[in-house]
Image (spheres, rainbow, N blue to C red):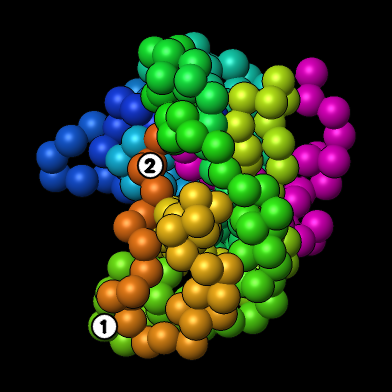
């Protein structure tokens, strides 16, 4: 017999070539699967709620996997955190219903993007975890730009070009706020799905608006385009965080509703 679990995984993306296993380069998926294989003496596939790129961080990436039912949530949680590398950490583990899949079962995802607008953003203790822009941005213009993307749109202008891809996404929430300590700004965005590089393209374009390099009206113009040729370059990866994925209550096993010891 086996049991499926959902892990909420944090990781520092600076040392990874992204989430998804690759022939070359260190990946988060490969690290998680290596620990699962060590604990279970056979290969176990880990499915992530999103496929973050190189340098992108996570504060709660949903990761699902199925293991022998000899494991309890508490014992597996301890074992995984004892063996994972120092740049990965599982916040909690929840038992799920059979057939649960971290990516396919998700009904929404949330990201955050941090920008440092002050001079100390260049500090080696901040630069790896935000866009060290070091210049002021017009917050009102950023908020006006973000308001234009809320709702269902075709985001072809804000994605890496692919063949026969569904570019329709529904943005449920998009807003900018001042970061704690007034050390810059954060962009928060939630949607049913995201395209490859979509958040970084959105942030890069909005930053150009916030710097006065392009008008706020460009957001609506770009949403009507069928290519990304007029879109600003994507924001750098180190400021982006996968925050959480949303799942229906029926996906969770009854034990998941009980406190973990």
Which residue carries the number 2 mark?
237
Q: Which residue is mark 1?
A: 163
The residue at 31%/40% (across/down) is 54
Q: Identify the magenta region.
A: 239-261
**Can you give x and y, in whole percent of width and height, for residue 98 in the image?**
63, 57
Could you tell me how far apart the alpha carbons at marks 2 and 1 are, in whole angstroms?
A: 24 Å
Q: Nearer the viewer, residue 131 or 20?
A: 131
| Residue for point 36% across, 43% down | 236
Looking at the image, the residue that sits furthest to the front is 212
Please tell me whether residue 252 belongs to the stretch shown in magenta.
yes
Residue 44's tag is none
Give the residue drawn at x 62%, y 25%: 183
Residue 166, image x, y percentages: 44, 83
Look at the image and tell me whether residue 220 can be seen.
yes
Task: Say what secondary structure mark 2 lies in.
Answer: helix
Residue 47 vs residue 23: left or right? right
Residue 220 sits inside the magenta stretch: no
Image quadrant in which you'd find residue 151: bottom right
Image quadrant where residue 91 sits: top right
Q: Position of residue 82 (x, y in %)?
A: 49, 12
The quarter in which the C terminus is drawn is top right
């Amino acid at each position: 017999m086996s049991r499926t679990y959902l892990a909420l995984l944090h990781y520092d993306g600076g040392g990874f070539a992204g989430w998804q296993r690759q022939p070359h380069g260190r990946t988060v998926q490969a690290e998680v699967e290596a620990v699962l294989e060590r604990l279970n003496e056979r290969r176990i596939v880990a499915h992530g709620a999103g496929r973050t790129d190189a340098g992108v961080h996570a504060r709660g990436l949903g990761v699902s996997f199925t293991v022998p039912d000899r494991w309890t949530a508490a014992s597996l949680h301890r074992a995984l955190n004892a063996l994972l590398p120092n740049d990965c950490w599982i916040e909690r583990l929840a038992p799920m219903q059979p057939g649960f899949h971290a990516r396919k079962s998700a009904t929404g995802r949330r990201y955050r993007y941090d920008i440092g607008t002050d001079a100390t953003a260049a500090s080696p203790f901040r630069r790896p975890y935000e866009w060290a822009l070091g210049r002021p941005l017009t917050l009102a213009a950023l908020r006006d730009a973000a308001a234009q993307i809320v709702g269902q749109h075709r985001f072809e202008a804000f994605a890496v070009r692919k063949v026969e891809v569904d570019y329709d996404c529904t943005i449920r929430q998009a807003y900018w706020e001042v970061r704690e300590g007034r050390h810059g700004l954060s962009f928060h965005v939630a949607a049913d799905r995201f395209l490859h590089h979509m958040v970084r393209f959105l942030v890069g374009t909005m930053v150009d608006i916030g710097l006065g390099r392009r008008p706020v009206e460009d957001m609506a113009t770009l949403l009507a385009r069928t290519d990304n040729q007029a879109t600003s370059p994507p924001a750098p990866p180190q400021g982006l965080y996968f925050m959480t994925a949303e799942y229906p209550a029926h996906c969770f096993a009854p034990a998941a509703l009980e406190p973990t010891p």
